[in-house]
């Protein structure tokens, strides 16, 4: 039937199309007759019956279980490979490190030197970095650091840096992000 529907555009072709459509219809009917003939022949064929087999009941034990004399043992779970089942992420591998995405937006520099280069390019004065000290407050106290920037004796800014972690498809990636405050 689908073949006849697919051949319907042949009817729009005029008499030559009508002839082709008729031949398509005859071919479709012939194939259908062959399929029906094969199916009826297969359905009429009988298969020999297999002799039934006897079913034996399960043997019964005469002993009663001795629950009192034998201690009950709970099944011990088989530990799975920790490395294969545990998802590698910043939270599982580096829980003490802040996520880079959780840092304030001004932490945009990849290093202390990159932030200092930015300040130097904006200043007309000669800048210098002071001694770097551990951060006492901010998003990463004790793990981050703080460096003052001076021009002569005047304080210009501070560069603060934090170690942070980023989750990637291949696992956690540690980096440092710095900001100017």
Image (tube, rainbow, N blue to C red):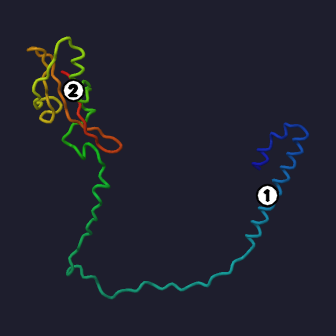
In the image, 152 versus 23, the foreground residue is 152
**How busy is the neighbourhood of tag 1: few (under 14 within 10 Å), some, or many (20 plus)?**
few
Q: Secondary structure at mark 1?
A: helix
User: Between residues 21 and 111, which one lies in front from this camera angle?
Assistant: 111
Q: Residue furthest right?
A: 15
**Taking 67 as reference, is 43 above or below it?**
above
Quarter containing the C terminus: top left
**68 or 115, which is in the foreground?**
115
Occupied quadrant, residue 111: top left
Q: Nearer the viewer, residue 25 or 86?
A: 86
**Total numbered labels:** 2
Position of residue 53 measured from the top left corner of the image (x, y, whole percent) = 56, 85
For disc 2, the neighbor class at 10 Å (few under 14, some 14 to 19, many from 20) is few
Question: As drawn, is 136 to the left or to the right of 91?
Answer: left
Q: CA distance from mark 1 to mark 2?
A: 82 Å
Q: Which mark is residue 113?
A: 2
Task: Please name the residue shown 21% across and 17% down the image.
Answer: 120
Q: Which residue is mark 1?
A: 32
Task: Say above or below: 71 vs 161.
Answer: below
Q: Quadrant of residue 180?
A: top left
């Amino acid at each position: 039937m689908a073949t006849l529907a697919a051949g319907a555009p042949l009817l729009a072709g005029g008499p030559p199309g009508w002839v082709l459509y008729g031949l398509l219809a005859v071919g479709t009917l012939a194939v259908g007759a062959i399929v029906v003939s094969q199916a009826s022949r297969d359905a009429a064929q009988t298969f020999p019956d297999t002799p039934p087999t006897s079913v034996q009941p399960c043997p019964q034990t005469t002993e009663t279980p001795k629950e009192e004399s034998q201690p009950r043992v709970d099944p011990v779970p088989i530990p799975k490979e920790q490395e294969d089942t545990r998802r590698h992420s910043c939270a599982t591998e580096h829980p003490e490190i802040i996520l880079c995405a959780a840092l304030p937006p001004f932490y945009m520099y990849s290093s202390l030197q990159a932030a200092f280069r930015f300040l130097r390019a904006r200043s007309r004065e000669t800048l210098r970095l002071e001694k770097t000290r551990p951060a006492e407050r901010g998003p990463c106290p004790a793990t981050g650091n703080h460096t003052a920037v001076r021009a002569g004796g005047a304080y210009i800014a501070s560069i603060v840096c934090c170690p942070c972690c980023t989750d990637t498809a291949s696992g956690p990636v540690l980096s440092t992000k710095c900001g100017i405050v």
